Amino acid sequence: MTKILNVNHLGKAYTSGSKKLEVLNDINFHVNEGESFAIVGPSGSGKTTLLGLCAGLDGADSGTIELCATRLNALNEDERALLRNSKVGFIFQNFQLLPTLTALENVIVPLELQGADNPENIGLELLKKVGLENRVDHYPSQLSGGEQQRVALARAFSSKPSILFADEPTGNLDEETGEKVVQLLFELNQEAGTTLVIVTHDMNLANKCKRVLKLKGGRVQAEQLSDRL
């Protein structure tokens, strides 16, 4: 199997006044192409920091990350942005939709950045898949939380990313809505064959993935096949 994400001896610390806060220490793991992978742990364990480093949103203090056969440490900020735009999709806990754009316009932003042909047709088809074909002209403020996250799902898959990072994708949703969003996420992911990396504190969600990495205090506590297998 080809590794799409390879993390070796990763470390990250932040300075607060005279104190140095070590967030991640000697993190090692890999994710194979087409695999679903969950990162779990209590609040403050370093999950979101790790996700940001793996996606090239921030730089590590030590160790290496290879994403889509590219070593992130060797790239500057602009080069990391180009890699993200061409290879990476994101889903966030707080949706991060652009408030001045409609649902359809939010979905096609990545496509327009890539200069894709017929972005509106692609966007409409994806919104139909997530059950929002009647909400294409609505703005985020006119949508429920679950609807906003479904728009975010459609946007994440619109550019056909090689790897999708999801940070607590159900964190702001009630249980029933969260279950519907998770079902859509895995359905779209299976259809697209995308590699999926999810940060979550929800073990039910984590166990829908093939493998689970457990963090505690900024270190890997365990890595295992999920309970579903």
Image (cartoon, rainbow, N blue to C red):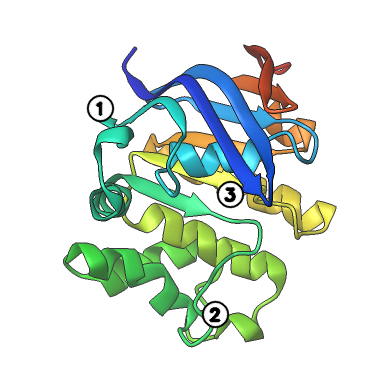
Q: Nearer the viewer, mark 2 or mark 1?
A: 1
Residue at left offset 55%, top offset 85%:
139
Nearest the viewer among 93 and 126 is: 93
Q: CA distance from mark 3 to mark 2?
A: 17 Å
Residue tagged by mark 3? Answer: 184
Looking at the image, residue 174 sits to the left or right of residue 153; the answer is right
Please report contact status of discs 2 and 1: CB closer than 8 Å, yes or no: no
Q: Return the x and y of residue 165 as percentages of the image width and height.
A: 50, 43
Q: Indicate the quadrant where residue 147 lies.
A: bottom right
Which amino acid type is shown beneath numbered disc 1? Ala
Nearest the viewer among 29 and 160 is: 29
Residue at left offset 59%, top offset 56%:
92
Q: Return the x and y of residue 140 as percentages of the image width and height.
A: 59, 80
Looking at the image, residue 39 sits to the left or right of residue 51; the answer is right
Query: Mark 2 Cα within 10 Å, few/some/many (few <14, many 20+)?
Result: some
Looking at the image, residue 227 sits to the left or right of residue 69; the answer is right
Which amino acid type is shown beneath numbered disc 3? Leu
Query: Mark 1 Cα within 10 Å, few/some/many (few <14, many 20+)?
Result: few
Q: Which mark is residue 197?
A: none
Residue tagged by mark 1? Answer: 69
Q: Earlier in the sequence, mark 3 or mark 1?
A: 1
SS at badge 2: loop
SS at badge 1: loop
